[in-house]
Amino acid sequence: MPSNTIGELFKLTTFGESHGPGLGGVIDGCPSRIPLQEEDIQTELDKRRPGKNKSSTPRQETDQVQLLSGIFEGQTTGTSIGFFIPNNNPQPKDYSQLKDIYRPGHADYTYEAKYGIRDYRGGGRSSGRETVSRVVGGAVAQKFLSCHNIQAFAYTKEISGIQAELIEPKNAQKYPYFAPDPSVVQLWDRKIDKTKKKGDSVGGTVEIQVHGVPPGLGEPVFDKLDAKLAYALMGVGAIKSVEVGSGLEAAELPGSQHNDPITPDGFKQNNAGGVMGGISSGQPIIVRATVKPIPSIYIEQQTITKDGEETSLQIQGRHDVCAIPRIVPVLKAMVNLVIADMWLLQSARQSG
């Protein structure tokens, strides 16, 4: 059966398509009496909203969330939190040429192979717009985690090979692209401008840190915390790889350098990324996700029709040049959902 739900105790179930009436979901398992207003969620949604920066699609959506249930007098009630976000600016006619053609880099071919039918209007359920519901779920999880002094923040480490220094990672949301290094913004701007003129797209890397996570979250063997984080991040359509802690660099280091020494005052470094044996160590959780280039480009590409005939395609419509920065709050949301779920699982274990 298809799964539209993530989480065991703190659960998010989502629905909706890119060019349908709207998107939404249900959050189950959020404890009661957590302070929550629509404004708390809207703050996160506004970070993801399209049409706000150079790399973004010109599609104009307000992304105004409507809380339908589970909130009373500014607090969660412990019951299901239902929400809905209308699509205000769909233009399905932009995709009429794609009805019988598979777009390279998209899920058109695989969705039709699986279901025998597909929504060609912007990819339907496989559209990046689907992630708006994830941001809502992550915002609720964030409010819950803040009650336990757990805070996640995310920033862009790299766009198209141009690296940023981690100068102000906690203040990255103040700068374009969620840049932790204000000086790199101009370089990224130039790269985006050049790419846009060519009709092409670029990718990048996003890093998320979570501070205040207590030791003990996560399960040994199959439900490791890092495995859950990788699962959640890889569940975002544009992500092609996930690293924890030192990540790929671990292959280049001897054990004497990679191991994190332990002292009476704590760990001396954090190559483990805050997870050892699949269980949180109490250090900051550090994960990175590689974001692929947007597949919708204005350059002519080779493809085939539904009948298997060779053809070429030049995509029209409104598309991002880079998923960054709009994907940054999405990835933070997925991490928040996992940490909230694992916190509740550990709490249940300790009280059982």
Image: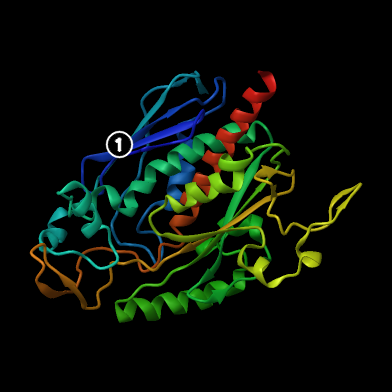
**Which type of secondary structure does the marked residue at label 1 adopt?**
loop
Residue 328 visible somewhere in the drawing: yes
On screen, 290 above or below 281?
below
Where residue 128 sits: x, y (%)?
34, 54
Query: Horizontal placement of 348 versus 87: left or right?
Result: right
On screen, 184 above or below 5?
below
In the current view of this chain or complex, which residue is farthest to the front?
A: 221
Where residue 250 sits: x, y (%)?
67, 66
Residue 54 visible somewhere in the drawing: no
Q: Nearer the viewer, residue 226 or 98?
A: 226
Where residue 337 sits: x, y (%)?
52, 39
Where residue 158 sits: x, y (%)?
54, 70
Quadrant (top left/top right/bottom left/bottom right) for the N terminus = top left
Quadrant (top left/top right/bottom left/bottom right) for the C terminus = top right
Residue at (64, 59) in percent of width and height: 169
On screen, 277 above or below 238?
above
Residue at (26, 49) in percent of width and height: 18
Snapshot quadrant of residue 85: top left
Disc 1 target residue: 1
* Mark 1 residue crowding within 10 angstroms, few (<14) / some (14–19) / many (20+): few
Q: Which of 102 and 37 is in front in this view?
A: 102
Q: What residue type is labelled 1?
A: Met
Snapshot quadrant of residue 123: bottom left
